[in-house]
Every structure is written in structure tokens, then in C-alpha cells.
Image (spheres, helix red, strand yellow):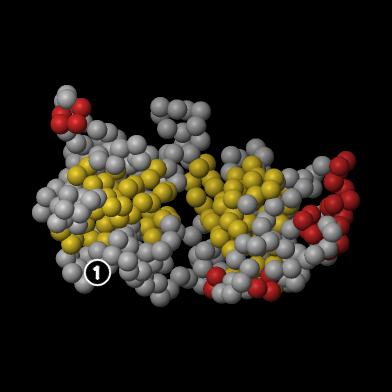
């Protein structure tokens, strides 16, 4: 989705399909829906064709393009329309059902899920058609995706398996880096995935600085003084390092996901709800092409650049743990990738 439109001139929901084959595909009898409760919400207009290696985009009704509303008369014995709209504040999913004709039954061609979206921001597949959707750096509807949006705040270091020592779980951490020239207030920010952590109101991360998130709260000296002392000694740092903590869960030693989310403005119909926008996400593994040395050998995963995508194993190296001191290449960029937005693998292909 691009975000939810509120009137003429506002961005509207859009769904783009890509044809990865060398032949045109006629979409007669195909359906799109935003819910598993009713797969037959929007029937793609007869005669719609996706050219070989081409795209077709459908927009939310009555602003531009085909409408997402469908007459309910035949199914429900009355008049009216079925709502078809993608939620930019709560996230949503989209189903694509295919009809290959000649008496064949409908089959599921694709299903995608996505979280809350920034205004004007699209989700696309990167780097190929095999992964889930991710926020894109630019809106390229009708054209190949040009890469994921990175941060700006990012995970700069992940120490998921320090060693096999008895206290190893208390020595793990994640580090967040702010490459901006201004301080960022982290009120209502949070981390989700293998660990859950809500940043306290008023927490900040300095300009071009790091913030280390620990499994225990370093500010709780009454209960965690020994844990903090062990942590500082292990990594030869002092208590002046910017640290917060007390997350639940543990970084998975067999591979896992960490997700940094920032808050967005509440929707007008529910001012108590806080949309959670994806700021950065990393799904790491313990085997190649991810650096296997980070698995229990006293090395951590270190990001190589502020513009490198967190899901790409080539964006990371195994290095000596340096909590609170991020060493990142500000000029590194994502290059040499191709992406298919909402790429359906109904033909069994996995394009690269």
C-alpha cells in the first residue's frame, strides 16, 4: 500500500502484480482480496493482461484506475458493495486467486502480509520473489523495485551467542545506531522479534551515536549491579556508555529476527492506537552465508555500513564485540539487486 487516501489528490491503496514469465498472462477470472474471510472481493476486469516480464497495478476505487468495490447483488440478494481497503495504520494482507481456465478450479497464486506503512511508502519484495514484503526506498509502481528503505536508525551490532559460559545470556545485546546529525527521542519506540523491549518515555539516542540494549536494566543498581559489572568487565567498557535494558526473551542462538519499530500518528478513528512503523529489521542465521564465527566464538555480528540492508548477510561481518562503539561505513550502499513487487510464483519459477 501507498497509504490510505482521504480524498482527491491523496495517495490511495495500490496493488501491483508482476509477470515473471516470458509469455503474456490473461487475468480473466482472477480475484484479489484483503481478507481470508472472503476471497472474492475484487474480480480483475476481463481482458486484463500482464505482458511478459511486465506489471499491472490496481488502485483503490474512484480515485484512479479500476475500483476495488464489487456489487454484492448476486451473492447476497441485495445491493451494495464489498469494502476493499488496505490499512496503513494496522497493516494488512492481500490474496491473489488464479483461474487458469479450461474447467480448472481457482487456486491461490499469492498471499502477502505487511505492517503499518508510512504515507506514500510502498512495500515490495527484495531482492527477489522469494521473501516477504519490505518498505521500499521509492515508489516504483509499474517498474522494478529499486531497493529497500534503510532505517535511518539501524541495528549496528548483534551479539546473540557470546559463548557457552553459564552467564552468556546476560552478556548478549543489540546495538542501535543513529546516523543522523540530530538526537532522536525514542518515546513509544520498541523492539520486537526474538526479544521484546519498550523504550522508556524520554529515552534518547544521540546524533551519530550508539545505544546498547541489554537483557537486564543497567539503571536498576539494586538488583543488577553484579550483572552490569560482569558486562562492563567482559567488554572493557565503562558505565558512561549509553545503555538501556530489561528486554524479555532471548536472542536465538540458532538464528532469529530483531525488529526496530517507531511510532506513527494514531488514526482518527482510534486515537488510543499507536501504529508501529518498521524502522529496521534483521533476520540472522548461524551458518554461511551469515558469518558463522558469531555463533558462540566471542564474536558479534557487526554491520558494515549505514546504507546496507539488514537482511542481507553480506551486510555483516563477525568482529570483536564493541558495545557502544559503532564503526560503520557511511558510504556503503545496496547495489546490484533486482526486485519484483508482489511477484507471484504461481508458475513455479523463482526469478533472480
Residue at figure coordinates x 33%, y 54% from the top left: 110
Mark 1, other Cα within 10 Å: few <14 / some 14–19 / many ≥20? some
In the displayed structure, would residue 34 be above or below residue 349? Answer: above
Q: Nearer the viewer, residue 168 or 208?
A: 168
Please state, as top left, top right, bottom left or bottom right, where the C terminus lies in the image.
bottom left
The x and y percentages for residue 180 are: 55, 57
Q: Nearer the viewer, residue 167 or 158?
A: 167
Residue under pointer 1: 21
Q: Is residue 12 visible?
A: no
- The residue sitting at the left extreme is 47
Q: Residue at x 88, y 41 (%)?
A: 222
Of 200 and 55, the residue lying toward us: 55
Query: Quarter-wise, where is residue 346 in the image?
Result: bottom left
Percent across and percent down for residue 28 are: 15, 52
| Res 232 → quadrant | bottom right
Whether residue 311 sits left or right of residue 141 in the image: it is right
Task: Measuring from the top left, give residue 337's x and y in whole percent.
Answer: 40, 72
The residue tagged with tag 1: helix, strand or loop? loop
Residue drawn at (24%, 33%) of the image: 82
Total labels drawn: 1
Q: Is residue 186 left or right of residue 31?
A: right
State the residue in front, 97 or 42.
97
Quick one: which residue is furthest to the front in this view?
103
Residue beneath the point at 25% across and 40% down: 40
The location of residue 272, given as percent across then percent down, is 51, 28
Residue 329 picture quarter: bottom right
Q: Is residue 121 visible?
A: yes
Amino acid at each position: 500500500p501507498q497509504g490510505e487516501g482521504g480524498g482527491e489528490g491523496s495517495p490511495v491503496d495500490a496493488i501491483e502484480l508482476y509477470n515473471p514469465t516470458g509469455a503474456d498472462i490473461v487475468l480473466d477470472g482472477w480475484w484479489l482480496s484483503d481478507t481470508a474471510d472472503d476471497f472474492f472481493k475484487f474480480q480483475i476486469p476481463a481482458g486484463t493482461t500482464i505482458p511478459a516480464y511486465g506489471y499491472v497495478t490496481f488502485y483503490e476505487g474512484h480515485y484512479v484506475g479500476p475500483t476495488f468495490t464489487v456489487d454484492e447483488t448476486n451473492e447476497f440478494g441485495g445491493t451494495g458493495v464489498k469494502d476493499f481497503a488496505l490499512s496503513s495504520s494496522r497493516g494488512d494482507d492481500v490474496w491473489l486467486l488464479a483461474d487458469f481456465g479450461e474447467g480448472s478450479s481457482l487456486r491461490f497464486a499469492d498471499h502477502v502480509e505487511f505492517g503499518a506503512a508510512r504515507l506514500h511508502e510502498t512495500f515490495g519484495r527484495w531482492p527477489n520473489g522469494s521473501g516477504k514484503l519490505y518498505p521500499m526506498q521509492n515508489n516504483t509502481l509499474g517498474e522494478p523495485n529499486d531497493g529497500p528503505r534503510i532505517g535511518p536508525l539501524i541495528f549496528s551490532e548483534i551479539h546473540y551467542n557470546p559463548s557457552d559460559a553459564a552467564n552468556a545470556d546476560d552478556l548478549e545485546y543489540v546495538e542501535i545506531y543513529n546516523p543522523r546529525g540530530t538526537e532522536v527521542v525514542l518515546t513509544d519506540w520498541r523492539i520486537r522479534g526474538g526479544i521484546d523491549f519498550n523504550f522508556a518515555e524520554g529515552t534518547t539516542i544521540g546524533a551519530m551515536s550508539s545505544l546498547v540494549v541489554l537483557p537486564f536494566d543497567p539503571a536498576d543498581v539494586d538488583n543488577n549491579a553484579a550483572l552490569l559489572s560482569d558486562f562492563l568487565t567482559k567488554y572493557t567498557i565503562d558505565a558512561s556508555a549509553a545503555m538501556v535494558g530489561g528486554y524479555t526473551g532471548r536472542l536465538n542462538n540458532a538464528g532469529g529476527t530483531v525488529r526496530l519499530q517507531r511510532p506513527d500518528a494514531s488514526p482518527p478513528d482510534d486515537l488510543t492506537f499507536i501504529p508501529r512503523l518498521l524502522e529496521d529489521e534483521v533476520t540472522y542465521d548461524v551458518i554461511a552465508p551469515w558469518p558463522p564465527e558469531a555463533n558462540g566464538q566471542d564474536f558479534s555480528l557487526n554491520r558494515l555500513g549505514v546504507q546496507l540492508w539488514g537482511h542481507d548477510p553480506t551486510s555483516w561481518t563477525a568482529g570483536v564485540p564493541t558495545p557502544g562503539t559503532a564503526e560503520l561505513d557511511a558510504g556503503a550502499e545496496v547495489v546490484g539487486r533486482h526486485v519484483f513487487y508482489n511477484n507471484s510464483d504461481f508458475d513455479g519459477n523463482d526469478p533472480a
